[in-house]
Amino acid sequence: AHAKRKFSETVEAHVSLGVDPRRGDQ
């Protein structure tokens, strides 16, 4: 659960920055 929380926080951080790592190559 701890790792999942960190993952969620990372995703939220990317969203707040307007960055999508999945679109990085496009």
Image: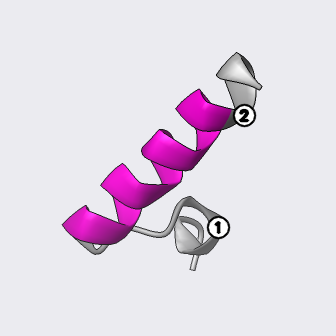
The residue to which callout 2 is attached is 4
**Residue at the extreme bottom of the image, as rendered:** 26
Q: Position of residue 7 (x, y in %)?
A: 62, 38
Q: Is residue 15 above or below residue 8?
A: below
Q: For numbered disc 1, what is the local secondary structure?
A: helix
Classify residue 4 by image quadrant.
top right
Looking at the rendering, the stretch of residues picked out in magenta corresponds to 5-17
The residue to which callout 1 is attached is 22
Q: Is residue 6 above or below residue 19?
A: above
Query: Which scheme is used to colour this image of the protein?
Result: one colour
Q: Is residue 4 left or right of residue 18?
A: right
Q: Residue 13 colored magenta?
A: yes
Front: mark 1 or 2: 2
Classify residue 18 by image quadrant.
bottom left
Which residue is drawn at the image coordinates 33% and 52% (left, top)?
Answer: 13
Q: Position of residue 3 (x, y in %)?
A: 70, 22
Q: Position of residue 22 (x, y in %)?
A: 65, 67
Mark 2 Cα-neighbour bin, 10 Å: few <14, some 14–19, many ≥20: few
Q: Amino acid at mark 2?
A: Lys
Viewport quadrant of the C terminus: bottom right
Q: Nearer the viewer, residue 17 or 8?
A: 8
Q: Amino acid at mark 1?
A: Arg
Viewport quadrant of the N terminus: top right
Which SS does the magenta portion mostly show?
helix
Q: For numbered disc 2, what is the local secondary structure?
A: helix
Q: Nearer the viewer, residue 21 or 8?
A: 8
Give the CA distance from mark 1 to mark 2.
18 Å
Q: Is residue 3 left or right of residue 16?
A: right
**Residue at the extreme left of the image, as rendered:** 17
Q: Nearer the viewer, residue 26 or 1?
A: 1
Residue 9 is labelled as none
Which residue is drawn at the image coordinates 41% and 58% (left, top)?
Answer: 12
